[in-house]
Image: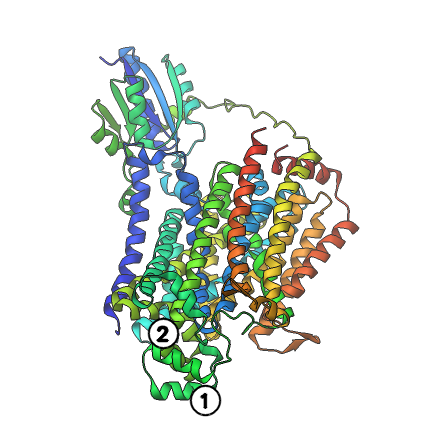
Amino acid sequence: MFRKILVAVDGYAPSMCAADKAVHVAQGTGAQVFALQVAEELPLLPEEKEAEEAALTVEVHTKTGDLEVHVENPLDIVTEFGRSRGVTVTPIKRTGLITATILAVSEEVDADLIVVGDSGLRGLKKLYFGSVARAVSEKSPRPVLIMKTDPACVTEVLDAIRGPEVAPTVPPVARRLDPAAIRRNLTIGGGLTFAFALLYFTAAVMTSAPYKDVAARMVAGLPLAFWTGLAVLLGGVVASRVYLVRSDHEGGK
Amino acid sequence: MENPIAVLIVVASIALTIWISFANRRHTRTTSAFYIADANITWKVNGLAGLGEYCSAASFLGVAGGIALVGVDGWWTALGFFSAWVVVLLVIAGPLKNAGLFTVGDALSARFGGDTGNIKGIRFVSMLATVALCGLYLVPQMVGAGHLFKLLLGMEYLPTVLTVGVLMAIYVIVGGIRGTTFNQMIQGIMLWTAMLALLIGVSVVYFNGNPFGIVAKATEVVPPQVLTEEVTTTLLDTGGSPEVMTGQAREMMPDAPSAMTPGVKLGDLQNQLSLVLALFLGTLGLPHILTRFYLVRNASEARKGAELTIQTLAVFYAMAFLVGIGAMYALYPTLVELLSAGEVGKATNMAVPILGDKLAGEVFLGIIAAGAMAAMLSTAAGLLIAAITSLGHDLYAGILRPKSSDKERLIFAKTSAGLLAVVSVLLAIWLKDENVAVLVAMCFGIAASTFAPALVFAVWWKRLTNHGVVAGISVGLVTSLVFTFAKFFELPELFGIPVLVNPALYSVPAAVLTTLVVSLMTKQTTEDVKRTDEFLALAHGS
């Protein structure tokens, strides 16, 4: 039957059901399971991220009440769940576009079955987020199994890790303040800021009523004020360029 | 309805923006190709989104409009807006991003003690300042939108601003959060392209396709606001083309300054200094601009995005200058007429759309109006999101209910942001005759007196204490608000001090001195000293 099963997990309820099914199929066939988590790298504001998380969280109705599933470490959970059922799960974590990465990894590991969860999004949310399950099944030449969300499988997977299994938090190494670093940054940023401020305020003061004769002096056929204005624009672009090059240079040390 | 085609274009462009941002998000999840996963995409998106967010009604309508009336002096607001961005990059972008925090309040509380330290005071004052700033900054966007739709629809200002203001708030609060970054990027591109189209249009139609011909012409034209009453009457009586009218004005006033003469309409040293100081430091304290740095992975990406924004802004404001001067010439008869009828607000705020109409009719008017609407919508979105973030994180989660869920926090924050938008619409009704660029500059003044000193000290000065921050922000906020409203109420002086075009000349030194003095008088706890060391080490990457 199946030798290599790829299951995509994301911490939400539907993907827990996909993982549940992948492990059960592997139990029956002796297949190897690869669990893939794709981290999206999108330029989103924190508030946008929160809104997306809220939109993607699927409520699972159970006998004991509604369960909102959004776990931070789905790979650990699925690996642990596989171990409890005697199935080896190989965790893979990638960064990129969700569907594209799932397809790429399915080629890499040569999966003969891809299992994904159906997010169950409807209406506007579906229009906005699209369906990863559908995209994978449409675009992959390999067999794809799409799992619907079922409270039983979600609780089964989550039960596997009940107890103090959460990864211990490593206390962060305290950083030491290096006054030289501040001085170094101050020389680059501060020096450029000072030079730019000098240009800016000179140009600005020159155009105020008391000094307007200076600003009106003709240089190359146009008043000085026009050239200082252009100089402010150009100076800003140059200053930011210099700053960027210098800080990347410093950062590379 | 007076301009059905133009209105249709505006509505269609808003719909298109929403659709693209929707399609884009779906696309990033379900595409099978890797072509947009280019490692450079994040800072490019971010840089262009920064442009879209930064260019508000003031930059798109106010700058060129101001230049059209007074000439080269009107360029100063643009140069200030631009320079402020450079200062952000040079002074705080890198360190703040290294420290990796959400809001200005978060950045400050990282230095002064997460959950354990005494940070409620800081969170509270920064929330107040954020809300005050965002609320006031929304006003010019509403005023601009009100005038724009008044021009497009031929309706009265009051119903227009009510409708447009409420629609803008609904757009942002209900749907706008989703895909805001992509929206901002699209709107940034739209604004830039619209300005370029205006420049090309005015060059081709009036200057034989040579944009530098605009500058040459500018040395001859007498700015409309400089014309004497007598000359204005004569010009209106004889009428004629721009060529004829500008020639006649110069003939009648041979010694009058030209569009390229500096210092014509700018105030005395005090007023000019106050204005440029506010503009220079303002962006350092604008919450809706600062959050943009939190989008990218690391300081290097943040800097690259910021640099892209700076370069596109430099070209944008240079184009705005040429478009403004071009508009002065091309719209000379219209501007003279509007000024003599006392419609300064319309002349200065609507010169850009009127130029579009004049160049290529209603279609172009529609495109320009769509660009302006994009400027106002994207800025309003950025502002309301900053307010929502601060209300949610700093007020609700930080002070009111620390153990609340994301959803509860969002509901609270969105409701409060809705109320804030309503207040802004009311203010926009009161302040309808104010120039949008002046209103925005005032917000820069408030920002320069509150967050700007606090953040700069937080990132660079070890000795800063939390009492110093709270006192500095409070004094800066109160001083700047008092002088801002004194200006709105048109008081010539307050407590014997002359009221200037901008509060910054008083409120910035007040805030800086208060922060310095209070910090030196108070002591950090040993816990705070340790945290300060860690924060500074993190921020400066040692």
Q: Is residue B540 above or below residue B158?
A: above
Residue B398 visible, this orientation: yes
At mark 2, the secondary structure is: loop
**Viewer-nearest residue: A188 or B61:** A188
**Viewer-nearest residue: B114 or B453:** B453
- First in sequence, mark 2 or 1: give its number: 1
Residue B422 visible, this orientation: no
Q: Is residue A243 left or right of residue B111?
A: left
Q: Which residue is mark 1?
A: B230
Please tell me which residue is depicted at 58% across the width and 46% down the height of the picture: B90
Give coordinates of residue B250: x percent, y percent: 44, 80
Dot 2 amino acid type: Leu
Dot 1 amino acid type: Glu
Give coordinates of residue B75: x percent, y percent: 49, 64
Q: Residue furthest front?
A: A220
Subunit that carries the residue with mark 2: B
Q: Is residue B136 above or below residue B538?
A: below
Q: Is residue B436 left or right of residue B129?
A: left
**Viewer-nearest residue: A3 or B499:** B499
Q: Which residue is mark 2?
A: B331
- C-alpha span from label 2 to label 1: 20 Å
Please tell me which residue is depicted at 41% across the width and 19% down the height of the picture: A79
What is the quadrant of residue A15 in the picture?
Answer: top left
